[in-house]
Image (cartoon, rainbow, N blue to C red):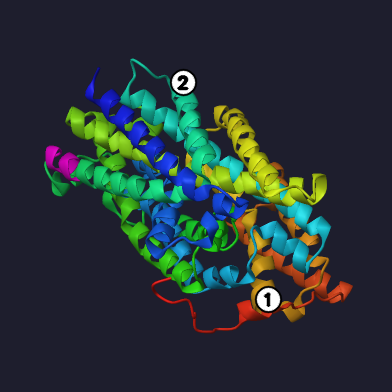
Amino acid sequence: MNSSAIIVGVYICVIFLISGYAKRRAAGKAENYILAGRKLTTPLIMVSIVGLAVGGASTIGVAEQAYKAGISAGWYTSAWGIGAIVMGLTVAKKYRRLNITTIPEMLERYYDTKGMTAGIFCQILVQLVIMSMQYVAGGTILSALMPEIFTPFTGMLMSAIVFIGVTLIGGMWSASISNLLNVTLKYAGIIMAAFIAVHLAGGMEQIQMQLPEVHGLDFVAGVGPMTIITWIVVLITVNISLQSIIQISLGAKSVHTARKGFIIGGLIMLPIGFVSALLGVIAAEMYPNISATLALPKMIMSLNPWLAGITLAALWAADVSCACNLLLSSATLYSHDIHKRFINKNMSEKSYMRVTRASVFFLGLLTLGFAITISGIISTLMAGLSLMAAFSVIVLMTLYAPKLCSRESAFYTIIASIIVLICWMMIPSVRILPHVIYMEWIVCGCVFLGTSALARNPIKEDENLRFAKEEVVDTVPASH
């Protein structure tokens, strides 16, 4: 058995042992399973958001982009970090004060059932698309790590077993505690690999001299300033409105814990994308004729076998940490907002847990079908994530200007976002802006405000919403 197989085998064993420990903490109420009993500490919030953000797109996808466009591709992960910081500074603690479980729950509470239903559909769809990226990256990593054992397809199957298994066993406790290992492993592995790769390539000056493109080590020119700005806009939008991210903040033990966890996590994310991008740049010099998707795995496999095994296992850990949060939040959307709301309103806690776990299993399998048809990790992701503009408009207006909100606004805003994306993809003449996210923000903002002005059916401000608007001092004791 080679070193890579040993390392991956040990990692899988450890991750399932952690999940077994987490299972005891997730027992009892469904809230323990889907929100960790709202007891996550600042370190667990921090590693959870880093684990979600620094997944396949932020490692394999960034290296793929850097192989073609240079180190500026690292701005993609930095944009995630900026989005997390904005989330922490603005709405993280406000979400925690609303005392909700899902975004659609908020839509039904303050808007209407139609808006909630449309919100469930969009949130699940976007999260399954993101999760499909993790299958693609996971299959690529395992096939590069152990080509004698895995093809890209069988690598995706193995990834599915781990993604689904870890989430099934311990829910959010499993995802968050395992991220303590995953985040440490991925950062240490990527940084060590970059340090050794630069040394083997003869240093940064030698790398710059040998690159086929002048902009290889330019921090802006490769992808261009407009693309960088677009990534930042998209990922700020996502951080304040995607269920899997919101679910992390809702699991915090206090409002200030949620805020600190997101800000620290965002700061930690800022540099790591450029390290992955540097490996992609070096791969472009050393392997100019390979598929861009294989840039990072190929570069790493050229290093010491044990280091290569640790680093690729770390990249696979990045996939695991990202996929588990996405899978759990998608299952929560189904069990909480569809099954409990429309199918069995009076189901027991035991049934709630059983339905959530069954949803984890079946949604995990469904994403395999998506993964088989996907190519171009970051470009695919950006299009799907643009739908979150509608939710961002709704959330920001609800939290900061509820008197300007109408109960009908949420539904029509979400429908408008879907129409904009379809038109953008199918009618080239409507592409008058640099990216669909800008059109989404403009159209969704106009539709929301226009509907509110015409309908004149204001939402009702309850105690939770008024509390979320207040900037009060958190009274939870530090030792609690």
Q: Nearer the viewer, residue 49 or 267?
A: 49
Q: Quadrant of residue 460?
A: bottom right
Badge 1 marks a residue whose secondary structure is helix
196 within the magenta span? yes
Bounds of the magenta segment: 195-201
The quadrant in which the C terminus is found is bottom left
Which labelled disc corresponds to residue 384?
none
Query: From mark 1 to mark 2, how far is it between C-alphas?
Result: 48 Å
The residue to which callout 2 is attached is 154
Identified at 27% across, 37% down, the residue is 311
Q: Nearer the viewer, residue 251 or 53?
A: 251
197 within the magenta span? yes
Identified at 54% across, 38% down, the residue is 168
The reply, left or right, for residue 197 in relation to residue 149 is: left
Identified at 37% across, 65% down, the residue is 264
The quadrant in which the N terminus is found is top left
Outermost top residue: 148
Looking at the picture, how far across and down is residue 65, in whole percent? Answer: 40, 42
Asked whether residue 447 is in view, the answer is: no
Answer with mark 1 or mark 2, whichever residue precedes in sequence: 2
Q: Nearer the viewer, residue 104 or 181?
A: 181
Asked whether residue 73 is in view, the answer is: yes
The residue to which callout 1 is attached is 465
Q: Quadrant of residue 201?
A: top left
Which secondary structure class fits the magenta region best? helix
Q: Amino acid at mark 1?
A: Leu
Q: Amino acid at mark 2?
A: Thr
Q: Are marks 1 and 2 in contact (CB under 8 Å)?
A: no
